[in-house]
Structure formats: C-alpha cells, structure tokens
Image (tube, rainbow, N blue to C red):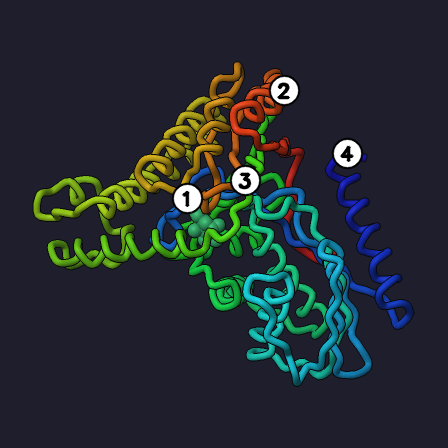
Amino acid sequence: MSELQQQRAAALHTLTLACDEQFGDGGRFTRVFAPGRVNLLGDHTDYNEGLVLPVTLGRGVYQAGRPATNRRIRLHSVNFGESLVFDLEDLPTPQAGSWASYVIGVVREFMALISLDRGFDLAIHGDLPAGAGLSSSAALTVSTALILEELTGQRLPRQELVRLCQRVEQRYAGVNCGIMDQFVCALGQAGHSLFLDCRTLAYRHIPLQFTDYRLVVIHSGVSRGLYGSRYNERRAECDSGVQQLRRHFPHVKSLRDVDMKMLQSREAGLEDPVARRCSHVVMENLRVRDAVAALLTADYPTLGQLMTASHASLRDLYAVSCPELDTLVDVCLATEGVLGARMTGAGFGGCAVAVVENAGLDSLSERVKTQYQARTGCEPAIFPLQGNYACGVL
Ligand code: GLA
C-alpha cells in the first residue's frame, strides 16, 4: 500500500469507529470524500474573474452518513470531538466559521433546492492540518453536499453544487471568497491540476507528470486565524480599482479586462495601494497562462520561476504574505534542487508550495526543519505531494 493509501485507510478506520461509537446500530453508512487543495499559481485572481491553477490534495474531509427514520439530524465531528442533535425544522445558528456552521449552512442551502423528508446521522473526519489555508472548509462543504446528494438520491449539476458551497462560505463564515476552492474540490481530478477561467468557468485538467520533480506543501506553522477581514479589504481595493479604471475605459467590468498598458497610462491615475493591487492581478493572470504552457511541456524550471515571481508579487504588490512565509520561501529557494516556491492561497499565514528535484527533497525537509524553525520560532510541517484525489463516493 502506498503512503497515500495507508493514510486514507487510517482516516476511514477512524470514521468507522466514530460511527459505531456515536450512532450504533441503525443501518449502513455511505461514505464520501472531498479533497483540500493547494494552488500552484493564480492567487487573488478568482474574485477578479481571472485565472487559477490549483491541484487537489490526497488529504481532505471524509464523511459517513445514513438516513434516519425520523426528522432528527445527528452530527459528530471527530476532529473537534463535538456532537450536535437537532430537528430538520429547527436548524440552529451556530457560531460563524465553526465546523457546524459550514455543515448546517450546506443543509440550509440544500433544503432551499431539494426537500429533505427525514433526518440523518453524519460523522465527519478530516486529515488536513487546521488553519493551513489548504481549503479544509471547501472540503467540508463539498463533502457535506455530496453526502446529502447520496442520502436524498437527488444530484445537483456540479457547478450548482460549487456555487452552493461558495455561498455557504460567504454567508456562514463571512469571507467574501471567490470560486476557486470549491470548484477544484468538486471538479479536480487525480493526477491533474485544474486550469480554471473564473470568468467563464471554462476549465481544463492539466496532467501533472512529476517524475523527476515533486511538489511539496509546507505549513508555516502560522495559523491564518481571522484572515477574513483583510481578505475582504483586498477585494474592496480591487473593486475600487475597477470603478476608477471604468471612468477612462468604459468596457472594464473586472480586472480581467485590464492590461498593464492601461494601468500605466497616465489617465488611469490610480493611487497606491490600489495601483499595486491591480498590477498583481493583471500580472498573475499572465503567469497562470505561462505556467499552464510550462506544465504542458514539462518545463519545471519555468514553472518554478513563475511561482517565485508570484510570491514576490503577493508579498510586495498585494501585501498578503507575512514575515514567516517570506522566510519559508527564502529557505526553500536557498536549497539546492528547489526550482521555485511561493505562498499559496489567501495568505496571512498558512502554507507555501515548492517544486523541487527528487534528489533535493531530503535536504529541503532538513533545512526547513532546522533553519526555518531557528529563524522564526515556528514549527513547520512538510507534506510532499504523494498523489492527489478527486472528490466522490467511496
Ligand atoms: C481563498 C479563497 C479563494 C481565493 C484564494 C486566494 O482561498 O477562498 O477564493 O481567493 O483565497 O487566491
């Protein structure tokens, strides 16, 4: 069994034990999985109708559910060691951003589309590090929507399911997020990255053929905590850029319609920080296109350079990095065999992703553990991408 398969077997075993303990007899459970994600390139572009290139992970959220004979819903989170019981007619309003708020949010949104005639038992277990920016919340909402589909026998078109989960994030966690995380979680494929145009929602699966190189995800040990307000602030800055640019270029509906020439033209007259935020988005979209071309030709040195340039842009222009992530990326880049590295996701903590030659993997792990920790006092966690999974019924 590969390491990835062993990890999955262990997660499913934990889930089965939890079902027995919490719910006992009462029928067979259906099991589903939805993965977390790491973004290779294209951050803070999705809500600007831009381009993204995320990859699903081998880790994510597992759920086991079965229909009840009455209208009671019983939920249990293995990770949080918490249980909740309530009636279908009387869904509680849990604390925004808690695990239960995501689950109840999906139930509410699902019930607005499809009626549930009875309750259910649901056990949830995730093997993503918490607060790491690897989209554990998208994995939680998508897996909840999948299990509801299984329990009701009613399937939503995939993109409708994605939108539903995005709405839950926006309404129940207060983060005005884009669509990337839920989209890749629901539509990503094993062995591939997902090239998504967030304006048209056209997408293409790009094969990952890392034979001599590996992708490595490294958690900085800095939890993103309350990143929502700063994320929403960036969105507002981009919206302000669009408003200002539209006065001179009436066709501009989003930053997707903007190029560097327009930004640099004197008429645009954008002030900082809005000018820097807009430059990041425009250049990042170009980097995503170049990264797709690099992946398709297995040109990993170019992919690495684009990733490193993206980090500099997120740090200097978009201001969503933090000293620890900058140090982490520096340590990666100073290691032989590393072709590129960047923070990934929303930022303000969380993870970096690096592309490294197979031969350099051990020394990368070693240096991150010693040097990064010595320089920041934070404890990193290293996850070489062993393979990745699509979501689905197990
Ligand atoms: C978070 C959001 C996504 C995206 C990224 C940044 O993960 O949920 O929609 O905006 O940040 O690229």
Q: Which mark is residue 32?
A: none
Residue found at the very far left of the displayed protein = 267
Q: Which mark is residue 2?
A: 4
Identify residue type, mark 3. Val
Q: CA distance from mark 1 to mark 3?
A: 19 Å
Q: CA distance from mark 4 to mark 1?
A: 31 Å
Regarding residue 198, the answer to whether it shows in the image is no
**Which is nearer the N-term, disc 3 or disc 2?**
3
In what element is the residue under mark 1? loop
In the rendered view, tell whether residue 353 sits above or below residue 9. above
Residue at left offset 79%, top offset 70%: 66
Foreground tag (4 vs 1): 1
Q: CA distance from mark 3 to mark 2?
A: 19 Å
Identify residue type, mark 2. Glu
Please state if 142 lies on the left or on the right of 317 as rendered.
right
The yes-or-no answer for disc 1 within 8 Å of ligand 1 is yes
CB atoms at circles 3 and 4 under 8 Å apart?
no
Report the residue marked by disc 3.
Answer: 222
Label 2: how many residues lie within 10 Å, few (<14), some (14-19) or many (20+)?
Answer: few
